[in-house]
């Protein structure tokens, strides 16, 4: 299937590589508000801005795609913008062949699973998530939509991660912990206690240091 990718940055490069490695879809073009049509990323052309998606779909016949925006809030905004313009646009998943996906794992549309990631049995991953390079999500976890698990981060079994939350590089969350919605877990943090909605937690052991707003940039 021909697909469109929304975004054309470094994160988009990784997504393009994963789609190519998986071999299920062909990336027809990119949509990006900040670049001119005809510019390329890894040989894939920018076709136009996101606001032109309806026109681009009509021109190319593509009706499916992925949002390649690394920031969770940014991904949410792009998703809402597309839904306003073309409610029928459908999202696929992309899972690198080197990722390990356990039994009874459910991965919702729009999610990307990167090289070396592990998602163990019984875990549910929501829509538009990023399970990044060498991240580990153990058994029976639940991840809401628009979650990102950064490279090298590890979740123990039975963890619950609320929608819009970002777990930073090499962070660890012990088994059974709940992290609320729209949180940020800092790089290298070790989470031993549950984290309320809209909090930033850092350190070893992790402590909540401030609150944050929905969609507040963290990258």
Image (spheres, grey):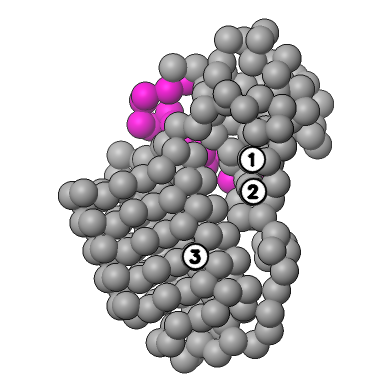
- Determine the CA span between mark 1 and mark 3: 18 Å
- Residue ID at (44%, 38%): 109
Please state which of residues 15 and 175 is positioned toward the viewer in this rendering: 175
- Quarter of the rendering occupied by the N terminus: top left
Give x and y (percent) for residue 139: 24, 63
Disc 1 secondary structure class? helix
Q: How crowded is mark 1: few (under 14 residues within 10 Å), some or many (20 or more)?
A: some
- Residue ID at (77%, 28%): 51
Mark 2 = which residue?
Answer: 76
Q: In this view, does 28 lie above or below 217?
A: above
Please state which of residues 19 and 82 is positioned toward the viewer in this rendering: 82
Cβ atoms at labels 1 and 2 below 8 Å apart: yes
Q: How crowded is mark 3: few (under 14 residues within 10 Å), some or many (20 or more)?
A: many
User: Residue 98 — which label?
Assistant: none
Give x and y (percent) for residue 200: 62, 78
- Determine the CA span between mark 1 and mark 2: 5 Å
The magenta span reads: 8-27
User: Residue 79 — which label?
Assistant: 1
Q: In this view, does 208 lie above or below 129?
A: below
Mark 3 = which residue?
Answer: 162
- Residue ID at (63%, 47%): 75
Question: In which image quadrant can residue 69 be found?
Answer: top right
Disc 2 secondary structure class? helix
């Amino acid at each position: 299937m021909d697909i469109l990718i929304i975004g054309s940055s470094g994160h988009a490069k990784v997504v393009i590589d994963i789609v190519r490695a998986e071999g299920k879809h062909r990336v027809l073009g990119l949509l990006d508000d900040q670049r001119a049509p005809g510019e390329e990323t890894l040989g894939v052309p920018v076709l136009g801005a996101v606001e032109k998606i309806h026109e681009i779909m009509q021109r190319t016949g593509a009706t499916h795609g992925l949002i390649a925006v690394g920031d969770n809030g940014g991904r949410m905004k792009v998703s809402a913008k597309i839904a306003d313009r073309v409610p029928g646009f459908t999202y696929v998943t992309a899972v690198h062949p080197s990722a390990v996906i356990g039994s009874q794992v459910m991965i919702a549309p729009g999610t990307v699973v990167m090289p070396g990631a592990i998602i163990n049995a019984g875990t549910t991953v929501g829509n538009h998530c990023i399970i990044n390079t060498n991240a580990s999500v153990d058994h029976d976890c639940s991840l809401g939509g628009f979650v990102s698990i950064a490279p090298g981060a590890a979740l123990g079994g039975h963890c619950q991660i609320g929608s819009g939350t970002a777990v930073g590089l090499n962070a660890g969350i012990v088994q059974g912990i709940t992290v609320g919605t729209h949180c940020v877990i800092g790089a290298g943090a070790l989470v031993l206690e549950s984290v309320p909605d809209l909090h930033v937690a850092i350190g070893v052991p992790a402590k909540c240091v401030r609150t944050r707003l929905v969609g507040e940039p963290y990258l």
